[in-house]
Amino acid sequence: MENITIKKNLSEEEMYISLLPQIENLINPGEPIISNLSNVTAALKETFEKISWVGFYFLKDNRLYLGPFQGKVACTIIELGKGVCGTSAKKKETVIVEDVDKFPGHIACDSGSRSEIVVPLLDGQKVLGVLDLDSYELSAFNHIDKQYLEKLCKLFLSKLSIEKLSAIID
Ligand code: SME
């Protein structure tokens, strides 16, 4: 049965340390990419109360397209270089936004969102997409989230077929 167990009263770092191997176990390379990635978003949302929205966008022809997510209805297309997601994909680096009102060009899919972190999905120097997390709290994400979310992305990318992942929005 697919489930995860995270003890209460852990620090956020301890929660990530407990979560990562559990997500690794959830990933089944023999099953469709979309099923695996859907469970990654669910595991994150279930673990961290601070997350209001978590999901993937995939890059094709300089546009990011909405993938599996947990949360409210979201914008389906983001141009490369636009918003926090497009900026992360263009720079090929994680972007932490402590206050979305102070990020010029932030795309507000949910007006309740106050802070955000976006981690690029990289195959070497090639950007496949991004993992985006939003919060209703200001400054919800920091270097701990960056460290472990980057690790998480590397972990599931190493277990999944990059070829299938690249074709996810064809
Ligand atoms: N805020 C993002 C858009 C995606 S939603 O948050 C789900 C951005 O500025 O790229």
Image (tube, grey):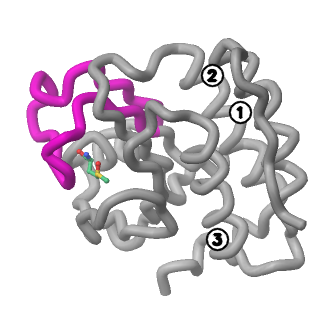
Residue 118 in the image, given as x and y percentages of width and height: 42, 38
Q: CA distance from mark 3 to mark 2?
A: 23 Å
Q: Quadrant of residue 71?
A: bottom left
Q: Which residue is mark 1?
A: 151
- 76 vs 31: above or below: above
Judge the density around disc 2: few (<14), some (14-19), many (≥20) Cα neighbours within 10 Å.
some
Percent x, y of residue 86:
29, 49
Give the mark toward the camera: 3 or 2.
2
What is the span of residues highlighted in magenta in the rendered image? 92-118
Is tag 3's residue or tag 2's residue first in the polypeptide sequence? 2
Residue 103 within the segment the image draws in magenta: yes
Q: Amino acid at mark 3?
A: Leu
Closer to the eye: label 3 or 1 = 1
* Residue 149 image position (x, y, % from top left): 61, 34
Distance (Cα) linking label 3 and label 1:
18 Å
> Does 132 sit above or below residue 168?
above
107 sits left or right of 80 in the view: left
Q: Secondary structure at mark 1?
A: helix
Of 37 and 166, nearer the camera is: 37
Which residue is label 2 attached to?
Answer: 147
As measured in the structure, the alpha-carbon distance from the residue carrying label 1 to the one carrying label 2 is 6 Å
Q: Are marks 1 and 2 in contact (CB under 8 Å)?
A: yes
Circle 3 packing at 10 Å, graded few (<14), some (14-19), many (20+), is: some
Q: Which residue carries the number 3 mark?
A: 165
